Image (spheres, rainbow, N blue to C red):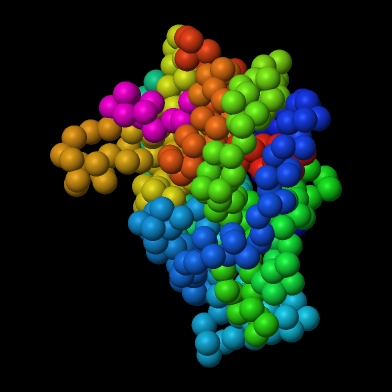
Amino acid sequence: HQTRHRSIRPSNLGQATMGSEREQISYLKKHTFKELLADCKKEVFTLPHDIKIKEALKLLSERKFLSAPCILKPDEKRKINEGLITGYCGIVHVNSILEAVMRRVQELEETEKKGTENAKPEGAPIASAEQAVQAKAQHWKNLDKLGKAFGEEEVMALTDLSDICETVTGMHKGWDMQRFVKMMFCNSEGTPIHRVVLFDNEGEIENIITQSDVLQFLKKHIIGEMKETGKKSIKDLGLFDPKQKVITVDEKTTAAKAFETIYKHRLSNIGVLDKEGKLLGNLSSSHLKGLDTEEFALLDAPIDFFLKFGDAKKRIQSHGTWLDDQLVKARTITVKPEETLTGLVNTLADKRAHYAFVVNDGDAPLGIITLTDVLSFFCA
């Protein structure tokens, strides 16, 4: 399945020396898919098909998940996909949530624009400051109303199959890791596959293997053994392209416009810059998990405030303090071009991050490296 959300992919990915390419592939081939399964024993969290979106968002946020399978309840279970998969409707993930929110916000803005044009006679003077304030207040009310309606919808409407791969566990038990990662996570078009849903012989979900699971496996079994490639810098290995511009937004851009940038460019995330052009933080579709559907007016707030507010409630409850600029920045994973492959893998694995921004000494973004880029490199 092709993803509708891509990472910023460097053009020179994998253009390392042939010796380096052989090293990473040879180490992957030493390990098997069965070893990965042994490391990834976990209970699969699912969402019932009729749960409301607002409740699903809350559960995803509490469990710190980016996605979950949507399952028909036992009394409504039916066979789909030619009878192979029973009760499985698809994956609900933050990307599909972002798409749904953006479509609704765009429709609202178009409706408001038409209403303003129809209410304003031709040749009428520009609206006064008071009228502008009233229009803004009405926009906030409309956003909150939109959010409440969105939250009441069933989550099944958000199921997506765009960036997953579905397969039966037993089919791959004899595969080595290089073959599994290449076949399951890196398709021929080069578009990212973020998760592999594994089913047993009865068609029930047995496990979900994510890019993060594979990265943890690389850290545990492989990266420490790579004597040559692991010591090379991410710049020398071509894991990012300094000539390719990183898409960013200014900190005072509204959250809605920032999310729109992610949506329109089909990105996984974007950088947020302060007035000096330094990386203040980052925004991704995952930030929608913590947005209360009854507080959609926050989408019209500046992105720096939105980022602080997203974690403020939790932080106040646990620490009694507001989330300040330094804490927002600390949550953004950054590396320097001189960072080694070993350092990058360890950082991403330890922080359980899905990407890292490459920055210079002045904290200006030079590039971004995603888990897709790392896995593609190991299969180059």
* In the image: residue 221, left or right of residue 138: right
The quadrant of the picture occupied by the C terminus is top right
* Residue at horizontal 64 percent and vertical 78 percent from the top: 200
Q: Residue furthest right?
A: 188
Q: Quadrant of residue 232?
A: top right
**Closer to the camera in the image, 241 or 300:** 241
* In the image: residue 271, left or right of residue 252: right
**Closer to the camera in the image, 290 or 368:** 368
Q: Residue 218, position in %: x, y?
A: 58, 46
**Closer to the camera in the image, 313 or 171:** 171
Residue 38 in view: yes
Q: Residue 280, position in %: x, y?
A: 43, 22
* Residue at horizontal 82 percent and vertical 45 percent from the top: 189
The quadrant of the picture occupied by the N terminus is bottom right
* Residue at horizontal 57 percent and vertical 68 percent from the top: 207
Q: Quadrant of residue 163?
A: bottom right
Q: Quadrant of residue 378?
A: top right
The boundaries of the magenta stretch are: 324-334
